[in-house]
Amino acid sequence: MRGNLKDFSPTQILNLVSLAKKTGMLAIDRKDVKANLAFKEGKLVFVAVGDADGTLASVLQRSGRITKEQAAALAKRAQQTGDKQLGLLLIQKGYVSQAEIIQSIKKHALAAVNQFAAWKEGLFSFEPGQQPGDERITVPLDLENIIVQIARVQKLDEQLEEEIPSLDIHLKFTERPQVKMKELQLNKDEWRVINFIKPENTIRMIAKSCNMSDKQIRRVVGSLREAGLVELVQIRKREKLSDEEKSKKVALVSRLINHFQSMPAD
Amino acid sequence: MQTQTVKMVITGPFNSGKTQFVGAISEIDVVATERKISSEAERVKDQTTVAMDFGRITVDDDLVLYLFGTPGQRRFDFMWEILAEGMLGFVVLVDSARPETFREARQILETFRAYAPTPYVVAANKQDMEDAWALDDLRIALKLEEGVKMLPCVAKEKETVKNVLLELLYSILEEMEEE
């Protein structure tokens, strides 16, 4: 099974794998990033997307359980022992519990599959029967729930794109926010965005300052709008007139002025 | 030669005097689209504009100025953007004696500024009323920037209406000279 995500979307592929209870490895090759998703009898068992390669060291680091330096040391060790042995060692030494490892892997898999689901193009191929090496820790995840969740997020993103069609518009705080400030609970991203809401900043500029993608900034702005905190302000730039157009307009306005000045009072 | 037409928009909150303003200067009877007020809360007058007011000023054989008054009630604001398209400038009319409408006037002003980056002036209408706010106080209440002209107005008097439109034209000219 080969093709391009342009023609067969990530959600369609996941649906097909789930319905046909396929076992194998889906490889995606994009200009900027490569990804591998392993399935066993229709369940997702392993995901590696770019730097998030699905190794135990990387997964634990991304979930914040170990530092970058610790991850580098563990990755070195895992080259000799494999992730399963390394995991056992970490559990025995009391650094992490089995539940924490499973939780971290699930979290990584969901984040990675969500990233894959947003891709609009990229060559893909599915190799039946192929699985990640035995040294990898695999955690089976039901695809049905993931697909439903992805579809929901995609629908929300589409709605947000309709509501905020352009990012070249400005934001302003509402004069009468419909929320009680005392009850206001914002997440980290929302606070970051709020920090940059100024008359001169467009949404695109705020996204750049906060290092957010178009989708991320739309979600944050969408939730701030829903909370009644901000509204969109579209300030259109004046078209620059040519010298000829300008002199014509000046003449026209002057004629209007002359007319009003000579208008008799009633 | 084909007659050239230009337009200006007169906007402002409900009952700020837009229909009267257009009527005071228009050479034709204002084509008004007034209907009876259906909302109890807004029954400070019998009728209100639901689409637009339309007035005309013929400058000469080949130049005509159209004045469009916007509907004041917010539920007709879908008309605003259509009316704002291609305007030379706009006037925001404020009822100087009704402070409860100042916030709305400010919001309308910002909405129109967003529709088109054209010059505008603010006209403090009903200055002949006893409880009318002074221009300086109004400027603060409306949070007007320093360069924005705030002009006294009595919409039923042609002379003050003429002055407001003249000031708007001066602003247009000034802005073009600054470019």
Image: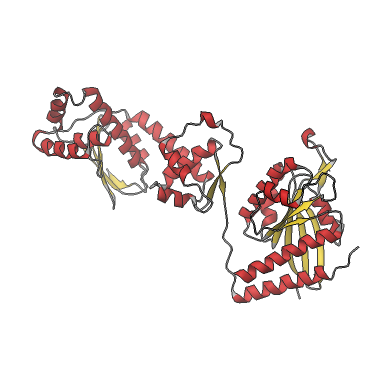
List x then y, in percent, for residue B154.
83, 53
Residue A44: tell me if it is visible.
Answer: no
List x then y, in percent, for residue A215.
43, 44
List x then y, in percent, for residue B133.
77, 47
In depth, the one of B146 and B48 nearer the eye is B146
Location of the N terminus of chain A (image quadrant): top left
At a point 25% along the width and 25% down the height, the residue shown is A100
Q: Is residue A224 above or below residue B145?
A: above
Left or right of residue B11: residue B161:
right
Q: Is residue A94 above or below residue A4?
A: above
At a point 81% along the width and 37% down the height, the residue shown is B43
Left or right of residue A161: residue A188:
left
At a point 27% along the width and 36% down the height, the residue shown is A62
Q: Is residue B4 above or below residue A36?
A: below
Q: Quadrant of residue A247?
A: bottom right
Left or right of residue A146: residue B125:
right
In depth, the one of A266 and A216 nearer the eye is A266
